[in-house]
């Protein structure tokens, strides 16, 4: 089969191909969230996507590639939501608050995405048995938060502290709140987000800005 051809023999349309891939990824998210990582077979995902297993296999080499794309897409889509909200803030304190609020708000509206993400990150392993994804804070997250915190210190908004240590604390606090919601869907995420914003605002502010 030529690269530009589809399973049906028609010319490939990149827009349609991408839409179908996203449809399959969304079906995988819903399947993992509902049935769990171990039970999320390609056949089950195909059924959820209302397509055939052969179509899923055409777009993804196997379950591993598909579930890795799930994680990539969730992270990418969440960053597309978070980034403009950070950019809209002119102060480091505003960016720190926006980071906490937007992270929680994005997943609050997409519980299935969070359930799938937690399950895949906690269970998906490489051929040698290691976890494929880091279950704690991603280095890029710590870098981003560290830059915000250092900017706040440089501009006199924040007191003196270890930016990396505080970045890790902020990241783990957000992860912890979302984890609590995974375990108990009655947790008030909006209230938790507001408390975290207040907590880190008071913990980081310099005396001059209090």
Image (tube, helix red, strand yellow):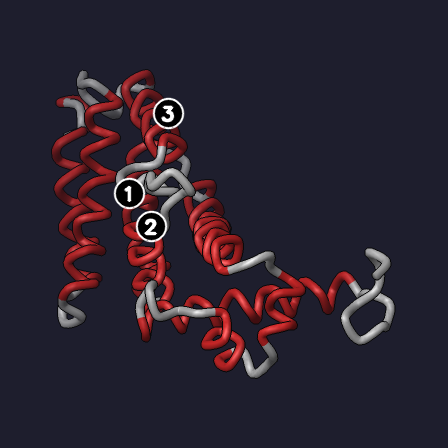
Query: Which mark is nearer the camera, 3 or 2?
Result: 2
Please tell me whether residue 146 is drawn above or below residue 192 in the rendered image. Answer: above
Report whether 19 appears left or right of 102: right
Upstream in sequence: badge 3 or badge 2: 2
Report whether 114 appears left or right of 19: left
Q: Nearer the viewer, residue 11 or 164?
A: 11
Q: Secondary structure at mark 2?
A: helix
Q: Secondary structure at mark 1?
A: loop
How packed is label 1: few (under 14 Cα within 10 Å), some, or many (20 or more)? some
Upstream in sequence: badge 2 or badge 1: 2
Q: Give the labeled residue for mark 2.
A: 121
Residue 185 x, y percent position in the rendering: 18, 70
Query: Which mark is nearer the camera, 3 or 1?
Result: 1
Please tell me whether residue 129 is drawn above or below residue 37 in the rendered image. Answer: above
Q: Give the labeled residue for mark 3.
A: 147
Q: CA distance from mark 2 to mark 1?
A: 6 Å
Name the residue: 64% across, 62% down.
Answer: 59
Name the residue: 22% across, 37% down.
Answer: 170
Upstream in sequence: badge 3 or badge 1: 1
Please tell me whether residue 121 is drawn above or below residue 209 in the rendered image. Answer: below
Q: Assess whether mark 1 and mark 2 are in contact (beta carbons under 8 angstroms).
A: yes
Q: Secondary structure at mark 3?
A: helix
Q: Residue furthest front?
A: 128
Residue 188 x, y percent position in the rendering: 15, 65
How packed is label 2: few (under 14 Cα within 10 Å), some, or many (20 or more)? some
Residue 69 x, y percent position in the rendering: 51, 54
Q: Can you say which quadrant of the picture contains the N terminus?
A: bottom right
Residue 95, numbered circle: none
Q: Is residue 77 visible?
A: no
Q: Give the labeled residue for mark 1.
A: 135
Q: Nearer the viewer, residue 30 or 67?
A: 67
């Amino acid at each position: 089969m030529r690269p530009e051809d589809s399973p049906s023999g028609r010319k490939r349309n990149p827009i349609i191909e991408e839409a179908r891939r996203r449809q399959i990824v969304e079906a995988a998210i819903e399947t993992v969230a509902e049935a769990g990582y171990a039970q999320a077979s390609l056949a089950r995902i195909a059924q959820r996507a209302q397509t055939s297993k052969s179509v899923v296999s055409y777009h993804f080499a196997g379950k591993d590639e598909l579930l890795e794309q799930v994680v990539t897409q969730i992270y990418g889509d969440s960053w597309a939501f978070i980034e403009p909200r950070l950019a809209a803030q002119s102060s480091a304190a505003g960016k720190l608050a926006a980071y906490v609020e937007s992270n929680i708000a994005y997943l609050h509206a997409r519980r299935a995405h969070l359930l799938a993400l937690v399950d895949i990150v906690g269970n998906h392993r490489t051929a040698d048995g290691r976890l494929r994804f880091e279950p704690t804070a991603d280095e890029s997250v710590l870098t981003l938060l560290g830059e915000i915190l250092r900017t706040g210190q440089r501009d006199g908004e924040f007191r003196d502290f270890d930016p990396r240590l505080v970045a890790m604390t902020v990241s783990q606090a957000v992860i912890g709140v979302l984890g609590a919601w995974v375990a108990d869907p009655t947790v008030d995420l909006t209230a938790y987000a507001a408390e975290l914003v207040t907590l880190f605002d008071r913990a980081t502010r310099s005396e001059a800005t209090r």
